[in-house]
Amino acid sequence: MGATAKQRANIYTVMLIVAFVALVLASVLMYLELKKYEFDIEAKEYDRAEILQPERSQSHYGPPQIV
């Protein structure tokens, strides 16, 4: 039996490694960001927030009227 040569990494292997590094980096950065906020992902003002609706006028439902 002869010695076989090791295959070189092709472009798909390199892309796989780059994607893996990007996912690991994103996970670490997300962990650090959440750590700043003590892993609290709930909105503080959610229950007390008012939702303001724009006032509706006749101009939205038809052509403008000249008064």
Image (tube, grey):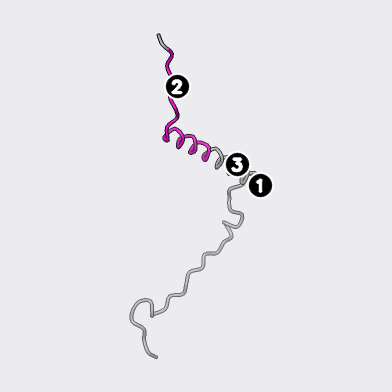
Q: Quadrant of residue 39?
A: top right
**Amino acid type of disc 1?**
Lys
Which quadrant: the C terminus?
A: bottom left
User: Closer to the N terminus: mark 1 or mark 2?
Assistant: 2
The percent position of residue 5, horizontal first and vertical second, equals: 43, 19
Residue carrying label 2:
6
Q: Is residue 51 magenta?
A: no
Image vertical order of residue 36 relative to residue 12, above or below: below
**Amino acid type of disc 3?**
Tyr
The majority secondary structure of the magenta stretch comes to helix
Q: State the CA–CA distance, disc 1 to disc 3.
A: 9 Å
Magenta residue span = 3-23
User: Closer to the N terminus: mark 2 or mark 3?
Assistant: 2
Task: Compare residues 53 and 64 and report the one nearer the observer.
Answer: 64
Residue carrying label 3:
31
Mark 2 packing: few (<14 Cα in 10 Å), some, or many (20+)?
Answer: few
Q: Is residue 20 magenta?
A: yes
Mark 3 packing: few (<14 Cα in 10 Å), some, or many (20+)?
Answer: few
Mark 1 packing: few (<14 Cα in 10 Å), some, or many (20+)?
Answer: few
Residue that appears at 45% across and 21% down: 6
The percent position of residue 29, horizontal first and vertical second, equals: 59, 43
The percent position of residue 4, horizontal first and vertical second, equals: 42, 16
Give the number of the mark in front: 2 or 3.
2
- Residue 36, numbered circle: 1
